[in-house]
Image (cartoon, helix red, strand yellow):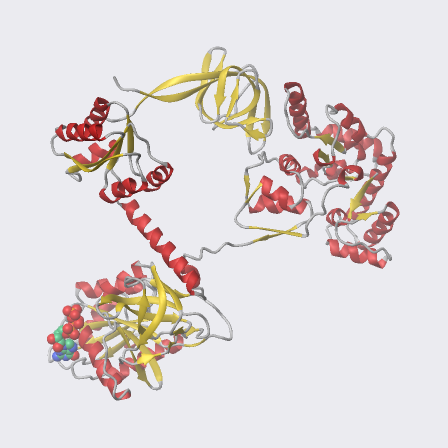
Amino acid sequence: MSKIRVYEYAKKHNVSSKDVIDKLKGLNIEVSNHMATIEDDTLIKLDNLYKKNDASGQSKSQTSNHQQKNAGNKNPQNKPQQQVKTLGNETPKANTTIVDEDDKNTDPTKVKVKTVPKTLEGKKHDKEYQSKENKVFTKPNSNNNNNNNNNNKNRKPGHQNKRQQPVQQVQAQPQRKKEKELPTKITFTESLTVAELAKKLYREPSEIIKKLFLLGVMATINQSLDKDAIELIAGEYGVEVEEEIKIDITDLENYFVEEEGANLVERPAVVTIIGHVDHGKTTLLDSIRNTKVTSGEAGGITQHIGAYQVVEKDKKITFLDTPGHAAFTTMRARGARITDITILVVAADDGVKPQTVEAISHAKAAEVPIIVAVNKMDKEAANPERVMQELTEHGLVSEAWGGETIFVPISALKGEGIDTLLEMILLVAEVEEYKANPKRNAVGTVIEAQLDKGRGSVATLLVQNGTLKIGDPIVVGNTFGRVRAMVNDLGRRVKEAGPSTPVEVTGLSDVPQAGDRFVVLNDEKTARQVGESRAQQAVLAQRGEKSRVTLETLFEQMKQGELKDLNLIVKADVQGSAEALGASLQKIEVEGVKVKIIHSAVGAITESDISLAAASNAIVIGFNVRPDVNAKRAAEAESVDVRLHRIIYKVLEEIETAMKGMLDPEFAEKVIGQAEVRQTFKVSKVGTIAGSYVTDGKITRNSGIRLIRDGVVIFEGAIDDLKRFKDDAKEVSQGYECGITIKNFNDVKEGDIIEAYIMEEVERK
Ligand SMILES: Nc1nc2c(ncn2[C@@H]2O[C@H](COP(=O)(O)OP(=O)(O)OP(=O)(O)O)[C@@H](O)[C@H]2O)c(=O)[nH]1
């Protein structure tokens, strides 16, 4: 009667389904896929094949198992049918029948056929169902053994203990026929609910719940399953699982992926100059630029765009023209890693100063290699030895002294030592092998940006990977646009900018901030979408930072001197009440705070009232009017406090009380119901489930509970899980049964009383 399927067989023998299919082919038996069933005579042939292959003898025991199964199925006493009968309140339907066989039940007498009613209504049925479930769970091993002993003398002893093994399914042909074939593969992102997984597997959710239950996991239809659980269940069906990682397209970080491969080519090093005030950072930057840029690129008019490139020995080096480690650190704080090498300038006549030390710490934190430029060597007081000595204390030991830090003596003013410094930069670059892929869409960082009267938003971008082209749809920080024009550091218009190149671009819809990331996207529509959504997120985040005034926080803010005016928006049903209310509110006198009505009008509370309130940190008072749907939603999103009243003096009282700081809500306990524990079930991972009967009132999911035994409160806490059969229940009323698990408490006993209560806010007198 029951046939084993290819994948089940494969699983039993710990081989792949493909292997089994191949073997079957070898026996001249064509099967379509892993779901195909294996005929009895074929099974014996297969068993023989695997017996030969399997020296461990495991296959042997499997063989005998199959044989038992077949024998059992011929047995007129066979249990499955009996059990269908005992559960037979309903006629078994194909889609409501679960046929289970755990590993023990390679013995046919252990095969369970159970009908799970679609709607679990009716108390009588309930009990039966619950107790059956319980039986499955606590089915003792010994029982199992007895049956085994009857049928199976050569069964391996270790076999019975394979309880942890996934439960196998035996297919009861008549019931299974209607089921859709299993998919070969399912995909998911993050997680799936039981219902979603069931749908993907073309199976009933109850079947999935059942499987989880047998694996020791209590789940409801809407419960989310994590990757492990999904894989476990899919594995049960022999279905492959693939997790799809969802990428948030608005997170620009996701575009900054490091790549490997043939497209990577060498790119110029990006260098930042740091050091103490007046040690010569600007002079050095100018010196490098003047000696290298103008000489190399005749005719170019240097443009200060925040960064520039020089050529040394046919290789480019990019310098960030923003001296001072503050800029460097700001960028880093904004998550931008743009510097490859840092030049620490130390004046030879002045030595290590506080800002030198600070600069070292920043460079080290950024894990950027440091080259020390010992400047002002032309000065008489220059003492490079001292600089070297002092830097040793900060972990920068010169190569001359056996360390690893490159020291270059220079005079930025006289342009001496600049070539050596540049050579050293190239040397470090060579060792570090900075690479990028010029063939991809450009990504990078904003070096600086401003609003230009004639050109609009102007931003200097450092391309860090890819090539930026005119016309590229681009998202920059929280703004977006299309690259209209690009100008390089020599003031020349360019059409393209490759890796490590700084360019000034126009065409953005707004001015980004230094340190913002930019990414080029494939089309303008997406760029707009990402840009706008980022702008919106930024606005929300910014608003979130400023906490809103609510009546509860009012006093706190007043105490901290944060609030001088209490801004109110008054909406009322008629002009008269709006005016009267406004006038009365303004008369409230509380020290240190003044009521200010910023808007007063007739009509329902609208979305624009809420945005006004949000922008001016106001509380909205509705007098005989209510917020419309959009306003409600907006108020929630913006956390705007909306107070609705029908009596003027109540409004005044509330505002005054709040202003006086007495608006702590008062709560009182209210008992809402009682349940009697009639049966307890211990479930691993879940704890003890108290099978209870609600004797009075109701038990709600979020109520507090007291466990009373012989009139004594044993435990006080909260409900962890409230279930009506297998489903989560919000509340269960008098006269109904339910399963209750208590948070952090498992010592529930039959006869215990569970008292449920809620905390109710009470009106102040
Ligand atoms: N003699 C001599 N003076 C130099 C040298 N380098 C810079 N100076 C002078 O030192 C002073 C400060 O130089 P800057 O380049 O402005 O120093 P900085 O580190 O950029 O200073 P801040 O921008 O204030 O942080 C200026 O008067 C320079 O002319 C040098 O190599 N030799």
Count of numbered circles in the view: 0
Percent of width and height locating residue 710: 50, 11
Q: Is residue 200 left or right of residue 111?
A: left
Q: Is residue 764 left or right of residue 9?
A: left
Percent of width and height locating residue 425: 32, 78
Quadrant where the N terminus sits is top right
Residue 675 against residue 336 in the figure, above or below: above
In front of the other: 5 or 350: 5
Q: Is residue 331 visible?
A: yes
Q: Is residue 165 left or right of residue 379?
A: right
**Residue at left 79%, top 52%?**
55
**Residue at left 25%, top 88%?**
299
Percent of width and height locating residue 701: 48, 26
Please, which residue is most extreme toward the top here? Answer: 711
Percent of width and height locating residue 39: 85, 47
Residue 506, located in which quarter of the rendered image?
bottom left
Ligand 1 located in image quadrant: bottom left
Q: Is residue 252 left or right of residue 487?
A: right
In front of the other: 544 or 602: 602
Q: Is residue 393 visible?
A: no
Residue 474, located in which quarter of the rendered image?
bottom left
Residue 365, located in which quarter of the rendered image?
bottom left
Residue 585 against residue 451 in the figure, above or below: above
**Residue at left 64%, top 24%?**
130
In front of the other: 355 or 407: 355
Residue 364 against residue 164 in the figure, above or below: below
Quadrant where the C terminus sits is top left
